[in-house]
Structure formats: C-alpha cells, structure tokens
Image (cartoon, helix red, strand yellow):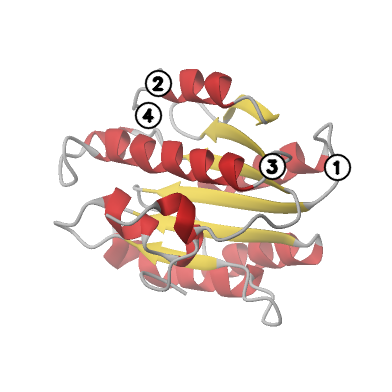
Amino acid sequence: LRSAQAAAGPATMPESTMLCLDTSSWMRNGDFRPDRLSSQRDVAREIARVKMASNLENTVGMLTYGGAGVEVRTAPTNQKSKLLRDLHGLSAGGKSHFVSAVKIAALALKHRKARAGEERVVVFVGSPIDATEKQLRMLGNSLKKTNMALDVVSMGESEANGPLLRTFVDAANNPALNNSHLVTVPEGQIPYDVVVSSPILGGGGGGG
C-alpha cells in the first residue's frame, strides 16, 4: 500500500474534523472482517493519524451515534494518544441516531476552543438511515451555509442508503471547492484500503 500520509499531500491551512462513528447494533455485522465496527475503527484511526500529521495545528474529535443516543467521546484535540484511547473502547448496540450525530458534530466544531481554520465532518454509516431525502438535503445545506465540509464513508446497507447519502453529500458540497465526498465500500473489499485511496485522504478514487 502506498503511504496514506503521502496521499494527503503537503500541509495546508489548519483543519478541525469531527469523526462520527456508527455504533449501532448493525455494526456487529461480519461482512467486513472481523466486523463493521472494527473496520470502521481502523479507518477512523488512520484518518486521524494522517490529518494530525499533515499539520500540527489540525485537531480531530470523535462522537458515536449508536445505543441510547449521540455521545461526544473526544472534543477536537491535537492529542493523538487521547483520541486513540477513546477509539479503542467502542462497542456496538442499539439504534442509529444519524441526523442527530451530524447536528451535534457541527455544534462541537462551532464551539471548539481553537476556532482558526477549516471545519469538516466525517460520518461513517453502516446502518439504515431513518431520514427522508428532504431532511438530508436540509441537513447538507446547513453544513454548506456554515462552510463545513463533509465526508461520508458508507460501509454496509449501501443499496438502501445510497440515494439518501448522495442527496446529503451533494447538498453539502461547495461546487467551487468540491470539498465533500461520498465513499462507498463495496462488499468484499477492505474499508481501510478503499478509504486510503479515496478523496477523503487525498487519493483519486472511491467517491466524489
């Protein structure tokens, strides 16, 4: 594999990112080995590593949106060790709270301590989305209006979620910057490999 850090390119202006991890019961599915939850964690860990390495002023936070509701596990930070500890202790169960997760991620970015730089929400999805296209279009538009970029990693239930996620990402995308991407991991492929070579980490394939 080529270096994901190299794929991210040279350091740019500071960016703060919130990772939204799906920890619903659907993430126990074993279609991605050993399961969706572990595969998601591997990808989230790499995204955080690359972003923190590309600019010392970058910060990354993390929330989960399974179980009883959304939980902000890590506010945006440049302390990689803290984020990795919080990623390590995740478990799957309960229902998905997708829309609430995106809204809370945006609030976490808005109220972070270091306000300089760009803002990005990265959402992992491995469970059916309980929202309409209209709701997702409004949600995407709200991100675009506040200049927040969006990346979505779809890794499971992609056939049902695909049109909804495309509407969501298209609404959030700024055409002048092309700053939002949908990456769908095909069944049988390794999520880490797909995301590392995608626009999320500076590659050219896997989404748009």
- Mark 4 or 1: the one toward you: 1
State the CA–CA distance, disc 1 to disc 2.
27 Å
Q: Residues within 10 Å of mark 2 (few under 14, many from 20)?
A: few
Q: Is residue 101 left or right of residue 33?
A: right
- Spatial distance from mark 3 to mark 4, Cα to Cα? 32 Å
- Element type where label 4 sits in the image: loop
The image quarter containing residue 144 is bottom right
Name the residue beneath numbered marker 4.
Answer: 94
Helix, strand or loop at disc 2?
A: helix
Three-letter code for the amino acid on which mark 2 is drawn: His
- Helix, strand or loop for disc 3: loop
Location of residue 157 with respect to 162 vertically, above or below: above
x and y percentages locating residue 51 in the rendered image: 57, 45
What residue type is disc 3 on? Asn
Determine if residue 130 is in view.
Answer: no
Depth check, mark 4 against mark 2: the one in front is 2
Residue at image point 53% right, 29% down = 69
Q: Is residue 153 left or right of residue 19?
A: left
**Residue name at image x 67 percent, y 81 percent:** 175
The residue positioned 80% from the left and 34% from the top of the image is 112
Amino acid carrying label 1: it is: Arg
For the residue marked with disc 4, what is the amino acid? Gly
Is residue 47 visible in the rendered structure shown here?
yes
Query: In which quarter of the view is residue 67 placed?
Result: top left
Q: Name the residue that disc number 3 marks.
A: 58
Q: Which of marks 3 and 4 is nearer the N terminus?
A: 3
Earlier sequence position, callout 4 versus callout 1: 4
